[in-house]
Amino acid sequence: MAQYKAPRGTHDIYGQMALALEELDKISRNVFRKHNFKEIKTPMFEDVSLFTRSIGEATDIVEKEMYVFEDRKGRKLALRPEGTASLVRAYIEHRLDMEEPIGKFFYCGDMFRYERPQAGRYREFLQMGAEYLGNPNPNADVEIILLAKEILSTLNINDVVIHINSLGCANCRPIFRQKLVDYFSSIQDLCEDCKRRLEKNPLRLLDCKIDSQKFQNVPTMQECLCDDCKNHFEQVQSLLKSVDCKYVVDDKLVRGLDYYTRTVFEVRSNAVGSQDAICAGGRYDNLVKELGGQQIPSVGFALGSERVLMAAQNTGFFDKLPKNELVFIALADNELFNEAFKFANNLILNKDNIRQKFNLQNNIVVEGPFLNKSLKSQFKLADKLGASKTILFGKTEFDNGKILVKDMKTQQQQEISLS
């Protein structure tokens, strides 16, 4: 039994899952770049105040879930719990608004949240996202939604429901906030989280999983939207309809981060269980200014890679993962090891198009040769590794300028001239 195990809420990634994550990364990058999004890589940890200021001190992430620590000089840092704040910090710091008149960026990387582990949700998890900075118009909201949908569709995840809502702006949200305070103040026996949220962040009560059955005829943001926000939300819906993108208006959708304004959305799939959001995002028109930049209207989304792959379990995605053909180099005589080693290296490098000369595919991988193993054990190892062909260096054949190539499925073999 192993003495050490991965910390609670983390997991090791290997085998087919590692291949699936690599393929998801490749697919996503292709989609991002097709829409003219450019990659930004940010540090895994940042000044803790970046997240408390952007995400909001009254959010669950900041209050309960951030990994916070001090470095040796007493600076308070946090492992990044999400990608938007870090990307916006980089956008401001490097004055990318001056270099990129249309600010389209994407990121991929590890995020960290101390929350209860559950299916597809870990304390260290892989996330990718896209941010569209500088466009205040509804078409940016819709492009972001369609971008997320395209990534999922490429993985054959089509049984999704897109939930959208508007959270209004600084003019109309305070009206909605007060209506919520008046409404929830009249409800008895709220859970402890809801009592706290009622004072600090009333919108988050709409997302409560404990007391939601008590809430009837809750005020909606739609009743409070100002004319500009109402018009923006109507245009978002009109554009979604124009491209035949189905959606549901969800009055209780608020998201867990304070920086959102106007459009918010979630993409949900029944394939991942009750916690069914596999992708989410929205507009954040004030965040860049709040973090020290200019007033830059922005919108973005993020998806959790592990949860997306959970949704892809039954779509055939895993069956279509790239498969390599393994060629095993075997020795019948240890004296030929150097020649076999040189041949294996030439195959790996495809030196002088050697793969084509031996009728091997470009996607081959090479294993061997091994010293001091019996021929029987080498063939057993080739079988166990799933080799399609074994190339055997035997003394008699090599002296005649030949090697043996054995097809491991048909068990047929033929001599091929090395020249």
Image: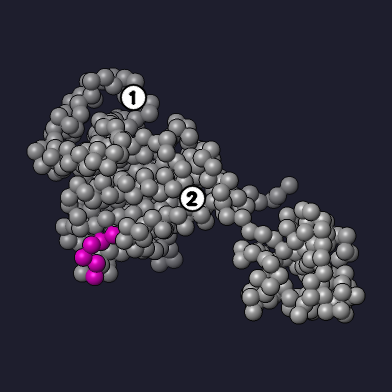
Disc on the earlier residue, 1 or 2:
2
Q: Is residue 36 left or right of residue 411?
A: left
* Residue 389 seen in the current view: yes
**Amino acid at pointer 2:** Glu
Circle 1 — which element? helix
Q: Residue at x 26, y 19 (%)?
A: 216
Q: Compared to 274, does 310 lie above or below?
A: below
Image-quadrant location for residue 165: top left
Could you say which is closer to the camera, residue 45 or residue 249? 249
Write down the residue under mark 1.
Answer: 212
Magenta extent: 99-106
**Label 2: how many residues lie within 10 Å, few (<14), some (14-19) or many (20+)?**
many
As for residue 194 lying within the magenta part, the answer is: no
* Residue 89 seen in the current view: no
**Amino acid at pointer 1:** Ser
Circle 2 — which element? strand
Write down the residue under mark 2.
Answer: 124
Q: Position of residue 402 (x, y in %)?
A: 82, 75
Q: CA distance from mark 1 to mark 2?
A: 29 Å
| Quarter placement of the C terminus | bottom right
